[in-house]
Image: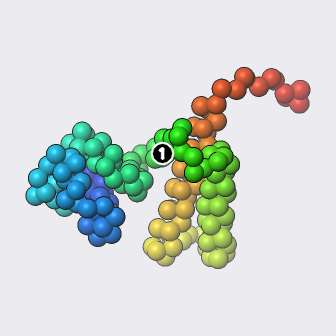
Amino acid sequence: MVARMTDAFARMAYRVLVEERKYSAKDVATALGMKYATFHARLIGRVPFRPDEIIALLCAVPDVRIVDALLGTTRFVAVPKVEADNKRVRNPILRNVIDAVSETTKVLDMVGRVQGADRIDDPDLRATLEDHVRAAERALAGLRARLAEEDVPPARASARG
């Protein structure tokens, strides 16, 4: 099981760095303190990443898909940490709610298109649905984390019970 998760992690890192070229693989190797050949051996799955290398890679390449691949079939969802100095988002709680509703609406729309189907057999549609479900889960988990961070007194017991 661990080997499969490591393989999925390496495959996604390879996809982001080599196929999509989102970051320079050579620069990332340097940031990790590795020769490119050593790093490439990990990207192609010949040598597994060590835990400290995984952390360093995630710091150098903050692509949530790599974290999703690492978490694989676990019960955990990757949620980026809240950045207190992020001035681009005026209301991060509202942003999380909007993201969650947006992704959930996309799932509802896609499932609505295949009305009456007990299963979703198209692998591309299924993969897209899973991506939107993960994004919705991430937004809801982010909302939960932001609400937990706020210094708010506990709620009074509801009269409606």
Does residue 138 appear left or right of residue 101 in this picture? left
Residue at the spot x=16%, y=59% of the render?
40
**Residue denoted by label 1:** 80
Residue 37 point in image, percent of width and height? 10, 58
Q: Is residue 84 above or below residue 120?
A: above
Q: Position of 72 compared to 92: left or right?
A: left
At numbered mark 1, what does the secondary structure look like: helix, strand or loop?
loop
Which kind of residue does numbered mark 1 sit on?
Answer: Pro
Q: Could you tell me residue 51's position as x and y percent?
A: 25, 40
Residue at coordinates 21% horizontally, 46% vertically from top-left?
32
> Closest to the observer: 117 or 81?
81
Determine whether, in the image, residue 121 is placed left or right of residue 114.
left
- How many numbered tags mark residues here? 1
Q: Tell me how the rendering is colored.
A: rainbow
Nearest to the observer: residue 34 or residue 75 = 34
Residue 133: give x, y in percent of width and height.
55, 58
Residue name at image x 54 percent, y 38 percent: 84
Question: At 73% from the left edge and 23% from the top edge, which residue is drawn?
Answer: 154
Between 119 and 13, the residue placed more toward the observer is 13
Quarter holding residue 108: bottom right
- Identity of the residue furthest to the right in this view: 159
Q: Residues within 10 Å of mark 1 (few under 14, many from 20)?
A: some
Q: Is residue 5 visible?
A: no
Measured along the vertical axis of the image, is residue 104 above or below residue 87? below
- State the quadrant of the C terminus: top right
| Residue 106, picture quadrant | bottom right
Q: Is residue 49 above or below residue 111?
A: above
Taking 120 as reference, is 100 left or right? right
